[in-house]
Amino acid sequence: MRRTGIGLLAATMLISGVAALALSKHSSAQGTNARGGANELRPAYANAADVADGKRVAEESCAACHGANGISVTKGIPNLAGQRPGYLYLELKAYQSGERSDELMTKTVKFLSDDALVKAAAYYASQDPSQPASTTAKAGPAKADPIQAGRAAAAGCAGCHGEAGVSKTAGMPSLVGMDPKYLVAAMKAYKNGQRKSELMKQMLSAIGDADMNNIALYYGLQKPARAPTPSQGDPTAGKSAASACAGCHGEQGVSTNPANPSIAGQDAQYLATALQGYKDGTRSDETMKALASPLDEGAMKNIAAYYANQQPQPPKVQKPLSVSELAQRCDRCHGIDGNSTDPRLPALAAQRVDYLEKVLHAYQKGTRKSSAMAAMSSTLTDADIENLAAYYAGKKARAVVFVMLPGK
């Protein structure tokens, strides 16, 4: 349908006042904002006069926050122009009933009649939506892919720890096969001086938490391989001597606890040096000191040789989804490129980027209720949310036409 002008059947809305109100009450009782099914909605027609009435309601009650013609110029306040009319009506009813909580919105719509809400929804649905990446919804550049960012940040590590974290230098540890949580904790310990290494402290001095997380993720997703460095001990003798290590470092050196490093396939000289460090106190850990104290140099080399000979395994870490992969999940409900065709669900295309970020964080924290959205947003990182918001803010908003067919 053409969205300019009011001489049109602009708001063929799949709602009715009575049905939608009953639907809102039912949803509140269920503790969800999925406001019912399509079977409970029926058409409510708005003609040019109704849309004109809706404009007057919008100008008096809504424009101060949502902008002239529904294009918001206020941070965190959504555009309403071109939004799906059924969704707008149901959300307004939710504010009236208390199902959605916002003091200003509740105060604004509290005494509006059902007819006024229908007409206001019709008016906003008839307006041209915001343009993508406009001055009111600037979608900044997408945040870098965390794996690629981690690879770039780890470039300075390769000289000592090897390409992809597999050490080729005796005495230097491999980083592959480590749980990202362990690597982050280790990097922070070097940075704050808890673990002693002037080189590591210097290397990490300019690395922030985000880059540490990305570096750890990058190494956690690389294919594990044994360090191709020599070992001097006896692996067979080392297997017996290593029996006390399995409780923390796992069978065959593959840890199941992020607090403890995997040591399977680790450089043997590094392992032997670390054991000696725990024994003489240059490395600090009471549990490791107690285990290392009885060991002589030969036993340490044997244990190191045993673990160096084991096959490292990948940690249990999932590769993050790309923005396009995340958006495919959102599009299942909100339509291709965020252009919803479901009258109950909002269009996301060309929405304000700051509003989209705000809403996703609200679903994560539970301050905005929806079991479906809570599940969808629960695994999103801050970077994911910024990228998704920018993605949809940059998409072109498109009209939706509800075609009414004659009965059979």
Image (cartoon, grey):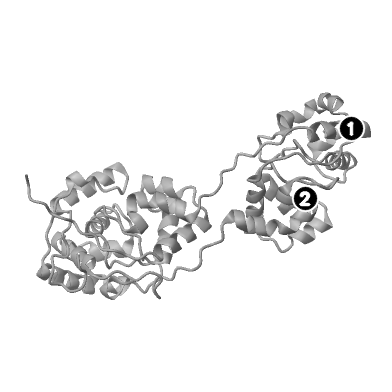
Residue type for callout 2: His
- Tally of numbered discs: 2
- What residue is shown with label 1? 233
**From the viewer's perspective, is 182 left or right of 408?**
right
**From the viewer's perspective, is 187 left or right of 343?**
right
- Where does the image place residue 19, in percent across and percent down from the top left? 15, 49
Does residue 369 appear anywhere in the picture?
A: no
Label 2 CA crowd tier, 10 Å (few <14, some 14–19, many 20+)? many
Where is 293 relative to 102, above or below? above
- Where does the image place residue 291, in percent across and percent down from the top left? 83, 32
Label 1 CA crowd tier, 10 Å (few <14, some 14–19, many 20+)? many
Does residue 350 appear anywhere in the picture?
A: yes
Residue type for callout 1: Gly
- What residue is shown with label 2? 161
Q: Secondary structure at mark 1?
A: loop
Say which of 368 and 151 sits in front.
Answer: 151
Report how far apart the C-alphas of labels 2 and 1 lie in the structure.
Answer: 22 Å
Figure quadrant of the N terminus: bottom left
Figure quadrant of the C terminus: top left
x 82%, y 52%: residue? 196
In the figure, residue 231 lies in which quadrant?
A: top right
x 89%, y 32%: residue? 233
Name which of mark 2 and mark 1 comes first in the sequence: 2
In the figure, residue 246 lies in which quadrant?
A: top right
x 35%, y 58%: residue? 338
- Where does the image place residue 184, in percent across and percent down from the top left? 68, 50
Where is 33 relative to 396, above or below? above
- Where does the image place residue 116, in percent across and percent down from the top left? 16, 64
